[in-house]
Amino acid sequence: MDVAQVLIDGKWRTADAEGTFHAENPAKGEPLPIAFPTSRWSDCDAALTAATKAAAELRTIAPAKIATFLDAYAANIEAAADSIVAAAAEETALPVKPRLKDVELPRTTNQLRQAAAAVREESWRHATLDLEKNIRSCFAPIGPVVVFGPNNFPFAFNGVSGGDFAAAIAAGNPVIAKAHPLHPNTTRLLAEQALKAVESSGLPPATVQLIYNVSNENGLKLVSDPRVGAVGFTGSRNAGLHLKRAAEDAGKPIYLEMSSINPVIFLPGALAERSEQLAQELVDSVLAGTGQFCTSPNLVLAFETPQTEPFLAQIAKSFTERPAQPLLSAAGRKQLHQGVSALTSAGAQLVTGGDNAAGEGYRYSNTLLRATAAQFLAAPHDLQREIFGNATLAVVISTQKELESILNLLEGNLTGTIYSAKSSADDASYDDIAPLLREKVGRLLNDKMPTGVAVSPAMNHGGPYPSTSHPGSTSVGIPASITRFAKLECYDAVRPERLPAILKDTIENSTTWRSINGTWVKG
Amino acid sequence: MDVAQVLIDGKWRTADAEGTFHAENPAKGEPLPIAFPTSRWSDCDAALTAATKAAAELRTIAPAKIATFLDAYAANIEAAADSIVAAAAEETALPVKPRLKDVELPRTTNQLRQAAAAVREESWRHATLDLEKNIRSCFAPIGPVVVFGPNNFPFAFNGVSGGDFAAAIAAGNPVIAKAHPLHPNTTRLLAEQALKAVESSGLPPATVQLIYNVSNENGLKLVSDPRVGAVGFTGSRNAGLHLKRAAEDAGKPIYLEMSSINPVIFLPGALAERSEQLAQELVDSVLAGTGQFCTSPNLVLAFETPQTEPFLAQIAKSFTERPAQPLLSAAGRKQLHQGVSALTSAGAQLVTGGDNAAGEGYRYSNTLLRATAAQFLAAPHDLQREIFGNATLAVVISTQKELESILNLLEGNLTGTIYSAKSSADDASYDDIAPLLREKVGRLLNDKMPTGVAVSPAMNHGGPYPSTSHPGSTSVGIPASITRFAKLECYDAVRPERLPAILKDTIENSTTWRSINGTWVKG
């Protein structure tokens, strides 16, 4: 084929393209062979029409079929793992092992299977029965969901296989995935497996659709279309805010994950006890995925103690010694350099790195910057700029008061971490600052780097604005992520035989938790 | 006093006023004696500063104290009921009995007490523990909440005593109430009781604050201020959409209830069985509160059958016979007439009413309009205009197909009702249209008028845009209404002694439902 085909209404078809683009191999800086289309509005329109029909059909389908689809899709991905991983490695320069094959791919299939289990259990619907008043309610599908995946997780956050996808499908909605243009082929291969699973499980053909790219204008038009139920977005703050306004002006719920600098605080006792180990942990975390994680620590806060300079020196040494890995794109490297330059312009001092690195592809030297608390407090906006890549800023603090001031000036973040002494040496300091940090982050950690995001019912991969668009919701963790893509449906005095199965007095599904007259009851 | 004082930081103080206004007695069309201030920004600023401090203090206070406040406030309202009801009757022209004293006031205190019970039980926090991964999360206060109450419920939706207020307080947030300018004195009297309860229960003084009025510009500034956690609004679509954009552009969650025409469908079998009784029910519902209910039936859909003309004639007769009650304001009457005129301009035919009515105050004749389905389908936008008052539009339908087309063209509504035969005569028709109506409404009713909104955990007083701003949330019903004003806080590997009480392995509160490793456990 000359140009890759889009997936609309169950068929791979030639796009109505206003142009084409090629992904690159960022490890080599070379364009890849397949041309992908930038779709005109007619492709979006066709996908929306098909999704509307699919949404109505999905409402009448047994949940078990949706679960079957999710499980089958997970199995299909595993069966095609080698080619999918190879494509992702080629498009992202992320290592095949362990990252893509042994970590991200199993995480993705695990997430799809957790979603399948949630669909079977049906507890996510939060069925609530007031038997005395005969009022009943539960969550139900919100309508077609448009999902924009980010550049940094080609599987686990991909619009056609990641967390938003799994959540939207589990809620019973069709998904229109917009591929990230840095890994269109990976997305295409995933969508092939999705379509096979759609067919084998008997879901409506338009349950999963894929468009590779659209103009900014059509992106805004897409998220605000009357046929859309909701939107999921993971990506840059700039793109996110434009989509946010368009969707919200049209009354469409949009869930965005946009940016985070993930402050990590080292209290004096922790450094006194184990500074070498902590430096190692930090280096591993900052350089994981070449720093291109939403939860990568961009801001290190450490008190001035006898251990602090050796601690920073060890980090700098490791940064210098470890080879810089390729970044996802030339644009990403350019933005990283702009970010580092912006930090130095705002008063930060470059300790190591700060320029392109040798080697094939788009590499940037592992970069450590430092600043004093006074400098940070003089330019708090500029010095908490997100730098997406293998760089971090260490701020050295003299007084508890300074740390408090810094925390009070932080914007919303996904995560915040405090390392403290195993002894009680840091307890007073911890008690003082933890409430301040708590207010600014979705997930508070102790003695552990934030870069792992477990798929747990208790996870919050979310946080105060502008890290996300709503501090009450999470994009990772089932069932909480599912209800984002649901509407609340109440039945008031509706006759028993007309109630949905999940709201009848007795329920066939023995696994479902329901709240009946204020008491949670299973089955 | 010359001008009523605002309540800021626990003190009644002279407002920084840019002007004053008087409420009116709408039963007489006469201004009331007390002057109320329109605050300049400095009052908002002072309230926001005090609320920020109160929010931090509230986070450290035992939930029992918040519950004590809510109960004490309910008791205080009851003790002062006579003067509060008298003030409300004077400002709204709503009947003292049964409406204000026997229905709305008890409903309001009941709601405050339900909120108190929810605070004590703590199940609303949705504590979720993954013990294996040592990840835990729960809902926590979102920060100061600004509440705008509507004109039509001086107690139950008042910014300083209604559903949003109770929910925001129960979540642990201070509230800045913006009074509705049609009932400022009622709001002042309620706030006096709230302040007494704040003092007696030992909450921070700024837990409840009151401003009577601000310019549109300062309203937009208020909802988008960085110190705000979230906003609750019940009122007109026009004002709501302006506040929505301002709040959302600043990344502030805003929950709006804006408009609804609450379609009521009478299937042929229902009219054949009991058309006289149904006409009576409809008349009672349309005229309740002089039609000034969010859930008032503005749109009646009935098939053309032998019973239909007598049914409509009976409604028209009742409308003509029953005296027109005063509306809330001169402006409301003007808007009602504009709405009726807009409907006739769009093709509807006036059956009865359609002009100002005799009697003291702002009365408008009980108004019935009718149109054919073909007329509705020719002007679906104009003919589903909300008419806030004692008027309704009946659309007579010839075919099932027409009804389907109408339902597909409806905007989002709070409620939708279907009356069908007690026999199975209408079952096929019901099964056909219920899914279409279900998509357009938050609450689906059978054989019951939508104007009662029970405070039940299973209630959904919400619906698809533009009836509200998010179809997944409800402003009535506890605990669901509370979590709107909460953020999700996750604790990842946080040391046991540092966890909030509700997330520890064992919990003292024996009433709290928590989800532990996927199982709901009490206490």
Image (spheres, coloured by chain):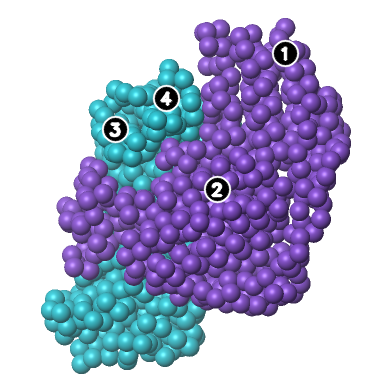
Chain colours: A purple, B cyan
Answer with mark 3 or mark 4, whichever residue precedes in sequence: 4
Query: Residue placed at 74% from the left, 35% from the top?
Result: A390
Residue B512 numbered tag: 3
Q: Alpha-carbon neighbours of circle 2 within 10 Å: few (<14), some, or many (≥20)?
A: many
Front residue (pair A189, B6): A189
Q: Secondary structure at mark 1?
A: helix
- Is A196 rendered above or below residue A362? below
Are the numbered discs 3 and 4 placed on the same chain, yes or no? yes
Residue A105 numbered tag: 2
Q: What separation in Å lies between label 3 and label 2 (alpha carbons)?
A: 38 Å
Q: Alpha-carbon neighbours of circle 1 within 10 Å: few (<14), some, or many (≥20)?
A: some
Q: What separation in Å lies between label 2 and label 4 (alpha carbons)?
A: 35 Å
Identity of the amino acid at label 4?
Pro
Pointer 1 chain: A
- Quickly name the residue at label 1: A308
Front residue (pair B214, A369): A369
Identity of the amino acid at label 3?
Thr
Whether tag 3 and tag 4 are in contact, CB under 8 A, the answer is no
Query: Residue placed at 52% from the left, 8% from the top?
Result: A423
Query: As drawn, is A326 to the left or to the right of B363?
Result: right
Query: Residue placed at 71% from the left, 64% from the top?
Result: A216
Are the numbered discs 1 and 4 placed on the same chain, yes or no? no
Q: Alpha-carbon neighbours of circle 3 within 10 Å: few (<14), some, or many (≥20)?
A: many
